[in-house]
Amino acid sequence: MAEQKEKLFDQFPPITTEQWREKVDADLKGVPFEKKLVWRTNEGFNVNPMYRLEDIADLKTTDSLPGQYPYVRGTRDNNDWLTRQEIIADDVKEANAKALDVLTKGVTSLYFKLSKSQINATDVKALLAGIDLNAVEINLGCCPACAKELCGILVDVIKEAGAEASFRGSIDYNPLRKALRHGGEILPEAVAVAKDMIEMAKDIEGLRVIAIDSVMLSNAGCYIYQELGYALAWGAEWMSQLTDAGVDAVDAGCAIKFNMGISSNYFMELAKFRAARMLWSQIVKQYNPACDCACKMLVHAETSRFNQTIYDAHVNLLRSQTESMSAALAGVDSITVVPFDAPYKTPDAFSERIARNQQFLLKEESHLDKVVDPAGGSYYVETLTVSIAQQAWSLFLDVQKNGGFFAAVTEGAVQKAVNESAAKRHSDMARRKEILLGTNQYPNFNELAAGKIEKTGCSCGCGHSDGDASKSLNTARQASDFEALRLATEHAANRPKVFMLTIGNLAMRLARAQFSSNFFGCAGYEIIDNIGFDTVAEGVAAAFDKQADIIVLCSSDDEYAQYAPEAFDLISGKAKFVVAGAPACTEELQAKGITDFIHVRSNVLDTLRKFNAELLK
């Protein structure tokens, strides 16, 4: 068999990178390679269109096996991640019943958020009644001020169940949460509380009590390298603070759990988790732990809320499916798929079931749990892993140089950097440099959403009145600006009508009518498309007959010099007149009094806001 393979490969002579490049340059016909095919990422590095073995020849990421330090290929020798579901219920008995039900449906990890009034032994026992603490991962969240009390109660419950040796789970102790969300100071006793919780949980090896919630940054719109860089700085701060307080390095490392987000950048996210494990293991190693077990990064991944949409909400399923696939292939420890209806209501039984099934498809149909680090050795993924690691490490060092993560949060530096990235992404959304299908591209023109939105707020019971808004994360979803436009249209007394006056060159008029329909459909306007008209006068008359508020001229650039002035004169201010395109005669048309043009370089959001202001009165 070996000889047959050798003969087979001998039939294909080796091709050098230079030969490939020559072929690509020939096909580009003079267009610069770097301009046409090299992609500049938001993460601060370039991505090439092709990679070869020589690109990873000097990388160290391929030198280890899964389960071996520095864990770039995973911390385990299997890929059987846990399927987590957040249990949302009004009281502990209802939550318990719901948990017991979903455990019969394949869920292996549970998350409960407890209010301040529920932090007592009676409620916690009722919450976990009937759940096998030896088999099911239990994760509890609460306000930071209650975490120490909750830790003591949970430890007692675990010991009563005799599950000390096999328990897996966490308490989401994050004393930075309030400072990140609302501004203000970090809890002054944060390190002392964390130290006490570690001591309380010392007999429960599988209980992690410190949360690195970089998912908060991801959901606020940060870039991938920022989430990773800040997560590492966050974790390193805890390692330094705890070891300085006398906590053993192994105990400190084994107390930390990372809760990270997943964006829709498929390969980048896959590489992010691989880079995260590699960098974190090296950070912890500097504290000289007696066991490498402290260097293993325990990661829970949650699909993005930043890119979820209210309109065309079922597209959220497609986004979260690819996101969860990135995390699964990257070898995370557990995954939560956020239900598709979460942006506008409390998820119902149907959406929660679909969210669970999305993970089951990856396991039972695609068998992603059967292969460890399938991307290992990929020229592309290995290169991305190192590139993201370099960018994140640079940010990590910058945070360290300026006083550490706690100081950066207190000063608002982290929030400011993330908010700037989010603002850039909102701007890119407005210009369609980033696309959310169904929102700023290919919207469902006739969908109504106002009636399905349920208002929800914080229910933790601890209050947030003393924050500093100037140092808080902006958590507006990327689609929120466009959704505000459509909701304004829904609430208006009259829905604006947009008439496509299609004339002239067949291909151009159809293409521009489709472009314009998608453009104005993003604001929820009524779209009236047409096959075409023989004369401008005929088209204008038909538009008036339909009582159009906006008339969009759709033709070719060459024909606009004739058609646009004629249409503008016939409309005579009785409707908004728009030219679809940016023709060479634009200045001449503007001199005529035509002011509105839409094209691929238009700021869609600002343009539609202007029309909303003029039409929705």
Image (spheres, helix red, strand yellow):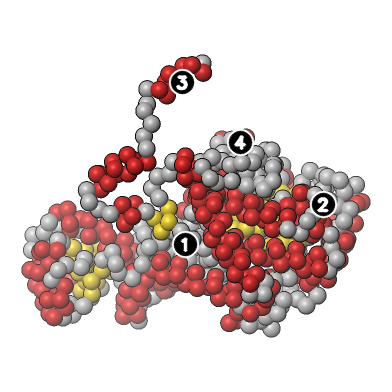
Task: Give the alpha-carbon distance from disc 1 to disc 3, as whole Å.
Answer: 42 Å
**Where is residue 524 drawn, in percent x and y?**
36, 66
Q: Which residue is mark 3?
A: 6
Task: Give the alpha-carbon distance from disc 4 to disc 1, as whole Å.
Answer: 31 Å
4 or 3: tag closer to the N-terminus: 3
| Residue placed most toward the observer, 391 or 564 | 391
Please rate how many residues cluster around mark 2, counting C-alpha atoms within 10 Å: few if below 14, some from 14 to 19, many from 20.
few
**Where is residue 444 drawn, in percent x and y?**
38, 58
Q: Which residue is mark 2?
A: 290
| Residue type (three-letter) at the residue carrying disc 3 | Glu
Task: Give the alpha-carbon distance from disc 4 to disc 3, as whole Å.
Answer: 27 Å
- Does residue 317 appear to the left or right of 527 in the view shown? right
Secondary structure found at label 1: loop
Q: Which mark lies nearer to you, 2 or 4?
A: 2
| Residue type (three-letter) at the residue carrying disc 4 | Val
4 or 1: tag closer to the N-terminus: 1
